[in-house]
Amino acid sequence: MPKGYWVSAYRTISDPEKLAAYNKLAGPAVEAGGGRLLARGGRVVAHDAGIAERTVLIEFDSFEQAVAAHESAAYQEALVALSDGVERDFRIVEGID
C-alpha cells in the first residue's frame, strides 16, 4: 500500500505566536494519527517558482491515514490556533508504493 505524505511549504509567517500555538497542538495530533516527521524548517534550496521558506514533510503508512489525520478533531483544533498566522501551500500526496 502506498504511503501518504503531508507536504507543507510556508510562503509567509505573519504571526509566529500563532505558529507556535499550532505547533504545540499539531505535533501530538500528527503523532496520534500515525504521522512521522521527516523534515521541518531545515535548509531549503528553492528552484523555479519555489520560495526558500519553512517546509514540512510528514509520512504516514497510507494515503488514507494521512487524510484521516488531517480530518481528526485534534488536528482541526491545531488549525484553529493557526488561523491566519501563516500563508502556506499544504498538500496530502500519495507515495509511489
Image: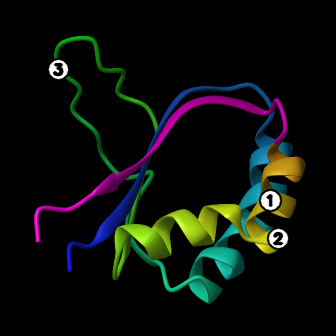
Q: Is residue 93 left or right of residue 87?
A: left
| Disc ID at residue 73 | 2
Circle 2: residue type: Ala
* Extreme residue in the left direction: 97
How far, Cα to Cα, is label 3 from label 1?
31 Å
The residue that disc 3 covers is: 47
Image quarter for residue 75? bottom right
Residue at 23%, 26% in the rendered image: 46
The part of the chain drawn in magenta is 83-97
Point out the tag, 3 or 1, that comes first from the N-terminus: 3
- Vertical arrangement, residue 19 with respect to residue 33, above or below: above
| Disc ID at residue 76 | 1
Q: Is residue 95 left or right of residue 83?
A: left
Front-most of residues 21 and 6 = 6
Question: Quick one: SS at disc 2?
Answer: helix
Residue at 33%, 52% in the rendered image: 93
Question: Quick one: SS at disc 3?
Answer: loop
In the rendered view of the protein, which quadrant contains the N terminus?
Answer: bottom left
- Vertical arrangement, residue 23 with respect to residue 8, above or below: below
Label 2: how many residues lie within 10 Å, few (<14), some (14-19) or many (20+)? few
* Image position, residue 6 (x, y; %): 43, 56
Residue at 79%, 51% in the rendered image: 79
Q: Is residue 87 magenta?
A: yes
Point out the tag, 3 or 2, that comes first from the N-terminus: 3
Circle 1: residue type: Gln
C-beta proximity under 8 Å, tags 3 and 2: no
